[in-house]
Amino acid sequence: MDKTREKTIDINPIPYLTWTWLKINKDSVSYDFSLSENNGIENRLPEGISTGTGKTVKTELPEPEPSIGKEAAKLISDSAAGKIYTIEKTTSEPLIIRIKLDSNSATHQIIHAKAGTSANIIIVYDGWLSSPEGVSKPQVLSGVITKVYAEDDAKLHISKVQLCGKNVNQIDDTQVVCGERAKVTLTQIELGGAHINAGFHATLEGYQSSFYSDTAYICQGNQYLDMNQVVVHKGKKTVCDMKTHGTAKDETTKTYRGTIDMRRGCAGSVGNEIETTLLLSPKAVVKAAPIILCGEEDIAAEHGSTIGKLSNEMLFYMNSRGIDQKTAEELLTNAKVTAAASAIEDENIREEIDKWIASSQSSSQ
């Protein structure tokens, strides 16, 4: 990256500031934001899904909001013409989009599910996984914006799988807005990369709309993973369930921000948020800020965040069955990812995730 052209910006801002001394309110990055458009390649376009170009769609739904911050969103958006995927009718075959990262790139996608439709979208990021011995590759920046419009009664399952090399930095933002009774499920797997900013912002606009997320990650080496997850309840009887589970090893840094925002008028809404981290190194830095904001009385919301090591009881159980501590740690680490990945409706991609984990573990030994 050309350091003379780098721009420093704040990214992943928490919706409402907490204690500044925790240094969790935001992340700051310095990158060259000279990006070329990269919308990836579809394996095959399923019947019922059409494509187009642009950054806007005709809809009565409001514009979704970014989780990464307005400045970062604009820098990425300005670098891409945009690609639109319109779900015209229900399709059972998943749309798989592979985005190969070999240079600074910007991705701007819109997924527009028409009323009453159902679809499954899988997006895989990879590239720069290896280099010849003694040869270092330059850092690559990937900026991604995925906007999701789910009209009334639409059902979408979106999976994002990040399998990048160690020299890839990524800013990945998923922006969601739901109409009445619309349901969006997001499965997110974060495994590779150097400095990763991954987040989503979901607005439950319509009556009985819902959003479910399952995020799993493994941080190892010197990786930096910064997450900002926000769900805003506006419609009555809306539901969200946010799950984030992962492992922090070596000298990694992981920050989690999770906000459930219950706005006035969302009576009867339910929100749940849980985040857990398996801490396997005294040098790893782990920070978490689970937040619930209440502007409505008639709601039910719970949240929690736990950071812990492998318990003596679990270790004793494993040892009694001939499993040493290192193997036990790998089993629990992998289980967090494979549990989330089991929802991805493509066997080949699930196998690819398993192989990536196995390869990364063997190379670290």
Image (spheres, rainbow, N blue to C red):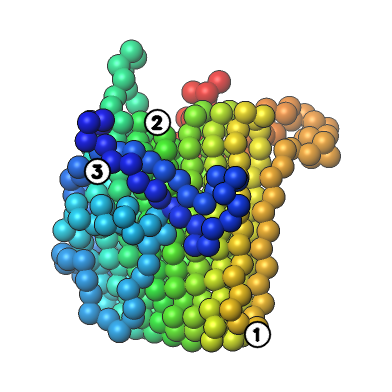
User: Label 1 neighbourhood size at 10 Å, few (<14), some (14-19), many (20+)?
Assistant: some
Residue 144 shown left or right of residue 25 in the figure? left
Question: What residue sits right under mark 2 in the picture?
Answer: 166
Residue 330 shown left or right of residue 98 in the figure? right
Question: What residue sits right under mark 3 in the picture?
Answer: 33
In-front residue for pair 364/302: 302
Q: Quadrant of the N terminus?
A: top left
In-front residue for pair 60/95: 60
User: Label 2 neighbourhood size at 10 Å, few (<14), some (14-19), many (20+)?
Assistant: many
Of marks 1 and 2, which one's residue comes earlier in the chain? 2
Q: Amino acid at mark 1?
A: Asp
Q: Quadrant of the C terminus?
A: top right
Q: Amino acid at mark 3?
A: Phe
Q: CA distance from mark 1 to mark 2?
A: 47 Å
**Kind of element beneath mark 3:** loop
Q: Position of residue 189 (x, y in %)?
A: 47, 49
Q: Residue at x 48, y 34 (%)?
A: 223
Of marks 3 and 2, which one's residue comes earlier in the chain? 3
- The label on residue 298 is 1
Q: Residue at x 30, y 84 (%)?
A: 60
Q: Amino acid at mark 2?
A: Lys
